[in-house]
Amino acid sequence: MKRIAKFFKVSFEEFQKAYMDEFGGDVDAARAVYDGIKLPARATSGSAGYDLFSPVDFTLKPGQTIKIPTGIRARMDEDWVLALFPRSGLGFKYRLQLNNTVGIIDSDYYNSDNEGHIFVKITNDSNEGKEVTVSAGSGFAQGIFFMYGITEDDDCDSLRNGGFGSTDGK
């Protein structure tokens, strides 16, 4: 296997800001969550996906949504992308869905002002009335690295500085 990427935690300052925006609380609560963050990992040597672990406990009733600041970032080679999906079991059992269907983490996101902080926004789309509970430290999403190509006449030289919508389709 070609080794093309590495996961890191974002700084505590970046995580604290994002965590408090989403969940409130105080600095001590944010620090406790930050200290417990686990870097993504594969479950088996044959797994394509790297499990992303929730930094917090959460429960979603049908139709509810939550945005999770994961506290992680991914450095990867220039011609690779990290695609995010729900964990298969959660999607199958509860219809847990990423709000953007598939999250795309570009290689240049790592150097953004927010340190390339990866967020995962998910909805319990159960049509069977099932509530889903995820404990801190449990896998709730997965990321798979894919190599990609560009067209022969591509002349893009724009630089990223931000996350969602920062490139405006340019």
Image: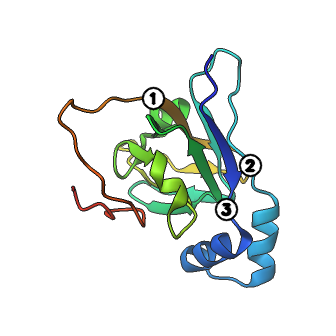
Q: Name the kind of residue labelled 2 in the image.
A: Gly
Q: Looking at numbered disc 3 in the image, what kind of residue is underneath it?
A: Val
Tags 3 and 1 in contact by the CB under 8 Å rule?
Answer: no
Q: Say if 76 sits above or below 36 in the image.
A: above
Distance in Å between CA atoms under marks 1 and 2: 25 Å
Residue 92 is situated, as x and y percent measured from the top left of the image, at 46, 31
Which residue is nearer to you in this view: 111 or 117? 111
- Which residue has dot 3 on it? 10
**Tag 1 residue:** 146
Question: Which tag, 2 or 3, sits closer to the chain's start?
Answer: 3
3 left or right, relative to 79: right
- Numbered mark located on residue 137 in the image: 2
Question: x%, y% of residue 119?
Answer: 51, 58
User: Disc 3 on helix, strand or loop?
Assistant: loop
Q: Residues within 10 Å of mark 1 (few under 14, many from 20)?
A: few
Q: Could you say whether the residue bearing mark 2 is in a helix, strand or loop? A: loop
